[in-house]
Amino acid sequence: MLLAGVACLYETLESGERQIYDFYYPGDFCDLHRYVKLEAVAEPAVRALTDCSIGIIEYRDLDQAIERHRKLALALWRATMLEASILRERLANASQRPALERVSHLLCEQLHRRQAIGIDGGVVPLTQIDLADAAGLSVVHMNRVLQNLRKLGVISANSRTLEVVNWERLVEIANFDSRYLTMPAALSNWEIRAE
Amino acid sequence: MLLAGVACLYETLESGERQIYDFYYPGDFCDLHRYVKLEAVAEPAVRALTDCSIGIIEYRDLDQAIERHRKLALALWRATMLEASILRERLANASQRPALERVSHLLCEQLHRRQAIGIDGGVVPLTQIDLADAAGLSVVHMNRVLQNLRKLGVISANSRTLEVVNWERLVEIANFDSRYLTMPAALSNWEIRAE
DNA sequence: CGATCTCTTGACCCTAGTCAAAATTGGTGG
DNA sequence: CCACCAATTTTGACTAGGGTCAAGAGATCG
């Protein structure tokens, strides 16, 4: 479980390209797929993008917790469902929308998720390379799209840190409907003692 | 739960395009996301692509079944995990691979899933339109890709029914590694009385 | 103060989309 | 059995979005 920093779930394809499936922020379980292990599944890997600290929950402890609170299983199932929901949205994004919209959408999602856990401010702590690998664009094109967004006054002019300064405009460009991200309410009612 | 036929999970985007997220075959739960409902989530829809028959499991019954067999929750959680796995693969597919590979991969997945439930023979009962919407290609391009596959002797010449005749070649073109599809073993050990 | 990583720019090309029209197939009903 | 309609498949011509290659400019760090 991620406590601080940013991590991502990714895989390196045969072509050598890196595909980033999802980003993780503090509070996210970044390893559930390992707990609910499908046999022999080719496993995507988790990797830190910034300095991170993590909490480790032993499988045994999780087993026990689930044993004790049966609703916990449901809550975790929901978390997986949410992840699937995010993936669906990203799939629609990648296959149907043009680059500007696609990148905007990705940024919207990140900001929204950060806000949901209390991190305000429009900073997105990812490199253009990470974003490119997540959006399925070349780094070069990602760069041009970001410049475009700068011209539109949506993100700050500073090229070092990516910061969204006009949230509304971004949502508009992205056609972003945050409903797919709605957090499973049940989960927030559960406290799991990490480690 | 789908008993016969083929259905799909899809959504119509703002642009009017239809994005198909997943296909369902007999034995698939096509409605779990509704049971484990995330509040206010914009819901994708399920729709039959051929004549279908379905089994309905009342939420109450499912609740009870889960109550009685605690491992059932885990099994269903796994089913969702598998769906996420499929979505990840499809995402990688859509954003990184060129059309020929992408289409081949999609076909591989469908055949593999059909075989897993005992439907042999290389027939894929989907229209080019469905495939296009699932692969994120235009119908025109999908058509050209399929012609290409015909020329390569991978699918049958008959344009009405899509049938794969050279499975090995297809797998090769697609760079298909079926591990991500490995069925959660636990699930098959459970019998749920439908209806 | 190199070495390295990230960001930027320009030139060129190719994959896949769009538009538009025709060919094929499958019904449906007279 | 044939005429007609709708859906699917096919074709061709043209376009454009985004990839690739290559080189240069900032940052950052040891």
Image (cartoon, coloured by chain):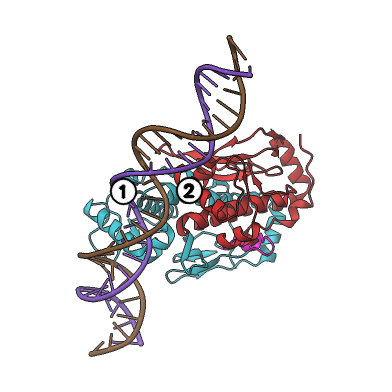
Chain colours: A cyan, B red, C brown, D purple
In this rendering, which labeled residue sits more in front, label 2 or label 1? Answer: 2
Q: Secondary structure at mark 2?
A: helix
Name which residue lies at 43% across and 49% down.
A93
Q: Residues within 10 Å of mark 2 (few under 14, many from 20)?
A: few
On the image, the x and y values in percent for residue B40 come to 51, 39
Rendering quarter of residue A161: bottom left
Residue A175 visible in rendering: no
- The answer to whether residue A40 is magenta is yes
Which image quadrant: the N terminus of chain A?
bottom right
**Residue holding disc 2:** B144
Which residue is at a point 48% across and 50% down the rendered structure image?
A: A91
Of B138 and A37, which appears nearest the observer?
B138
Disc 2, disc 1: CB below 8 Å? no
Left or right, residue B193 beside residue A107? right
Question: In the image, is residue A161 above or below residue A177?
Answer: below
Q: Circle 1 is placed at which residue position?
A: A167
Q: Position of residue C18 (x, y in %)?
A: 36, 41
Stretch of the chain drawn in magenta: A31-41
Q: Nearer the viewer, residue A86 or A181?
A: A86
For residue B142, above or below residue C8: above
